[in-house]
Image (cartoon, rainbow, N blue to C red):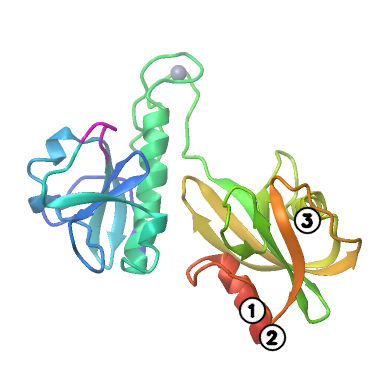
Amino acid sequence: MFVPAFQQKQSDRENALWFIIRDGLLLVKKNCQPATVPRGHQLADILPLCDHLQLLGHLDGQACFAAGLSKDFQPDQAFEFRGLKSLFGRIAEDHLWVAGRANLLVRWSQHHRYCGQCGRPTVDKQDERAKNRNHCGLVNYPRVSPAIIVAVIKGDHILLARSGRFPGGFFSVLAGFVEPGESLEACVKREVFEETGIEVKNIKYFGSQPWPFPDSLMVGFTAAYAGGNIRIDGREIVEADWYSRDNLPNIPPGISIARQLINWFTER
Ligand SMILES: [Zn+2]
């Protein structure tokens, strides 16, 4: 179990797991299967080069730290950098989600070296995970961007679409970012209509999943078809159709909430 924490005192850095991020990539030991996150005592040459150090919390009692490295850092023979999404199914799942937290928080720290209000260098607060201790009054918190993801059902068919951003990729349920001032339910209706021309009703909460690549929270819903014919823009969505459980197209892998929604459809 992972317990978040941010106060660094008394944490054993030598034996801690270190989630070191370089431009969205995670430092792991080379040629390990599954991928292996290093401990502090294995990083004597690397830790002095790191910045944006933060305690993330404790995984089964084990301290977990995050740190950043500059884009031009090249690891020696013992380590390599891997994209977080490429590690799906290739690293312990609890390590993947801690790595996601590290990615979000290192990126946040790197992007907030200076205060957006007064321009002075920021300082970490000591009583919460935030920046600008003793500052101009503007406190900066890590950003999480909510997005909806929805399985739209029509009889015994599910609406799946292929995004133009991932040519040749998966067909999946629809997803999109929440607009400022918008409710999650309004976002579901808007995204489905904008992307496919379909109207929905009976919107029900399904579950949620952090998606820290770099900073999303996916909020899952199911919904029923209420009207309309499929109409796609050919850019954001390049293909969309209704699929029955016995003729599903190429769908996303098991770890994502997208796949959990599709599994819910096939198993219901
Ligand atoms: Zn300030």
| Residue 54 picture quarter | top left
Magenta residue check for 70: yes
Cα separation between marks 2 and 3: 22 Å
Q: Residue at x 55, y 53 (%)?
A: 217
Q: Secondary structure at mark 1?
A: helix
Q: Which residue is mark 1?
A: 264
Q: Residue at x 85, y 68 (%)?
A: 225
Q: Are marks 1 and 2 in contact (CB under 8 Å)?
A: yes
Q: Secondary structure at mark 3?
A: helix
Residue 111 lies, in percent from the top left, at 42, 29
Left or right, 167 with respect to 234, comes to: left
From where the camera sits, is residue 219 visible?
Answer: yes
Residue 220 lies, in percent from the top left, at 64, 63
- Image height of 262 relative to 85, above or below: below
Q: Is tag 3's residue or tag 1's residue first in the polypeptide sequence?
A: 3
| Badge 2 amino acid | Arg
- Image height of 172 relative to 99, above or below: below
Q: Which residue is mark 2?
A: 268
Q: Are marks 3 and 1 in contact (CB under 8 Å)?
A: no
By secondary structure, the bulk of the magenta-drawn segment is best described as loop
**Residue nearer the viewer, 88 or 235:** 235
Residue 173 lies, in percent from the top left, at 67, 64
Please state the quadrant of the image where ligand 1 appears: top left
| Badge 1 amino acid | Trp
The label on residue 192 is 3
| Residue 127 picture quarter | top left
Cα separation between marks 3 and 1: 19 Å
Query: Magenta span covers which residues?
Result: 68-73
- Image height of 244 relative to 242, above or below: below
**Residue nearer the viewer, 139 or 106:** 106
